[in-house]
Image (spheres, grey):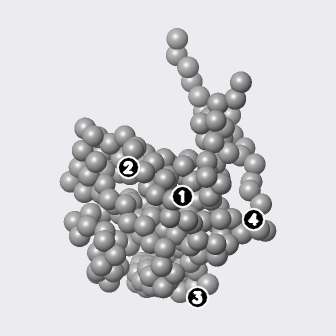
Amino acid sequence: MSNPTIETIKKRRSVRSYSDKQLNESDLNEILQAAVHAPSGMNYQTWHFTAILNSEKLAELNRLIKQAFAKSDEPRLQERGNNPDYCCYYNAPALVIVSNDPAQWWAPMDCACAIENMFLAATSLEISSCWINQLGTTCDDEEVRSFITSLGVPEHHKVYGCVALGYASPETRLKEKVLHQNTITIVR
């Protein structure tokens, strides 16, 4: 007998190429509800989810992230920042910024649980997703911070990750998951 939750977990893959088709409101709300139903330390729920569906706002966010990367001392980030074709969210039609109060020591773990819930909810709705880290490393850049605050990210929050959401482009081929051996130990 198959368990639909376990099957969804096994089916989930990161997608890095999206069609232009936008998510419908109902599906987006289901995904966001999955996020807020994730476990959180002491059930404090100090997180915040900022969903962006506006293509101009997404393009501006990408421009500001690239600008911050270009100022970095790290060559890999400089390369991305100076690449005119680089898009940190893979041109997905929707991006959810996941932020939290950094004063809560469990903030990153709470956000990780919420992000995984969004991935699984999206997969169950036949919507593709990918974890996006770039905003987490640039959220304190002055221009990036000003912009994300204007979008609704609480000013005192740190970004712990983002979720790109959309429908995989037709040419996308999902990789088969190859599991590493010897990653589980059971002590009886």
The residue lying toward the viewer, choosing from 169 and 80, is: 169
Q: Are marks 4 and 3 in contact (CB under 8 Å)?
A: no
Of callouts 3 and 1, the N-terminal one: 1
Q: Label 2 is placed on what type of residue? A: Val
Q: Which residue is mark 1?
A: 27
Q: Residue at x 59, y 28 (%)?
A: 184
In terms of secondary structure, where does tag 2 sit?
Answer: helix
Q: Are marks 3 and 1 in contact (CB under 8 Å)?
A: no
Is disc 4 in contact with disc 2, using a CB cutoff of under 8 Å? no
Are the two marked residues, 1 and 4, in contact with CB atoms closer than 8 angstroms?
A: no
Q: Determine the CA span between mark 1 and mark 4.
A: 21 Å
Which marked residue is nearer to the observer: mark 1 or mark 4? 1
Instruction: Assign a secondary structure to mark 1.
Output: helix
Amino acid under disc 1:
Asp
Tag in front: 2 or 1: 1
Label disc, if present, on residue 84 of the rendered structure: 3
Mark 3–mark 1 Cα distance, whole angstroms, equals 32 Å
Q: Amino acid at mark 3?
A: Pro
Q: Which residue is mark 2?
A: 36
* 40 in relation to 119, above or below: above
Q: Nearer the viewer, mark 3 or mark 1?
A: 1
- In the displayed structure, 180 sits above or below 80; it is above
- Residue 40 at x, y percent in the picture: 32, 42
Q: Quadrant of the N terminus?
A: top right
The residue lying at 54 percent from left, 49 percent from top is 121
N-terminal label among 4 and 2: 2
